[in-house]
Amino acid sequence: MIMIDPADSVLSVENLPFDADILTPEGHELVRAYVRRLDATGRAPVRGAGGNLIYFGDTPQLSGLRWILLLQASGLMLTALIGFLVIRYQRRAEQDKVWTAMARELAHQLGTPISSLQGWLEIMSLPAEERPEKLEGDVVAAGIEEDLVRLERISHRFELIGRDPDLETLDIREVVRDLERYLQARLPRLASGVLLIVDVPKDMPEILGSEVLLSWALENVVKNALDALAGRGGEIRLKVRKGPSGWLHLRIQDTGPGVGLELRDTIFEPGVSGKARGWGVGLTLSRRIIEVTHKGHIFLLNSEGEGAVFEIRLPTAEA
């Protein structure tokens, strides 16, 4: 605060932002220069008794409050930066987890036909009289051909992951029937005592999709059910029905123990598996194929009885 009389003499000062001795001409000049700066900024003085002019500035406490906004802004920026780094780290960790699971899944899928091919080679290296009965040349050749077809199928599947495949008009009945034939031939080895029941009416609308990827997505869900029924037997039902206009519904239900409550909200995330030795990539791939490639949806439904119920909803070709 500065008080100046009508003759422009400095009478008193308080809390100046600088040191000035008003008892000296130099001090007076410093204060007058400061008053001129206040006038230039539009801070009009208050006229007091006797015509004295009183100039008010910000108190030290008020000046200190200005730092609060700066500190708040700095805190917000620091929080945003930390949040960005955390999200970036989580995304990178998620990607690493996905790629690790994918690599393990690829190694697992390639291992079965490669081991089978090694077995066929061992049989072919045996003299004819030492080979197991009924394993003649044509049987061995057919087995090798089947394993090579499976290797090609696996490589084609993983080749399409991460790309935008060309979609074609598909008959869902043919896709499901092909999957049924593929699985029925392997049920005795995958899960003994399991009955696969397929219910697909003839008048189902066509869909736009990739036959290779869609078949893989359905196979992963069915194999998840097979793993749940391994050692106990049971049924797996795959049912296809028309949904609301423009949609097709596929439901896969098993009579296994179901999905635990602790896994229900994360069952489609990479690395999550209800199996002791599972890698948790099958359902993640299925969700990506259904939702990203085919613009559909996949859900784990609440089931009143035993078992798990997965529902897949796909847009039809006319949608």
Image (tube, grey):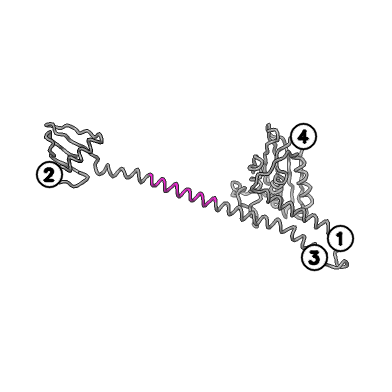
**Marks 1 & 3, CB-CB < 8 Å contact:** no
Q: Is residue 14 left or right of residue 232?
A: left
**Front residue of this view, candidates 309 and 219:** 219
The quadrant where residue 211 appears: top right
**Marks 3 & 2, CB-CB < 8 Å contact:** no
Q: Amino acid at mark 3?
A: Glu
* Disc 3: which residue: 122
Alpha carbons under labels 4 and 2: distance apart? 104 Å
Q: Give, as a single range, the part of the protein colored magenta.
A: 73-91
Q: Earlier in the sequence, mark 2 or mark 1?
A: 2
Q: Earlier in the sequence, mark 3 or mark 4?
A: 3
Q: Secondary structure at mark 2?
A: helix
Q: Amino acid at mark 4?
A: Asp
* Point 71% across, 59% down: residue: 111
> Above or below — where is 244 with respect to 28?
above
Instruction: Tell us which disc is closer to us: 3 or 2.
Output: 2
Q: Secondary structure at mark 4?
A: loop
* Disc 2: which residue: 25
* Disc 1: which residue: 137
Residue 221 part of the magenta segment: no
* Point 59% across, 49% down: residue: 262
Residue 88 part of the magenta segment: yes
Alpha carbons under labels 3 and 4: distance apart? 49 Å
Q: Earlier in the sequence, mark 4 or mark 1?
A: 1
* Disc 4: which residue: 203
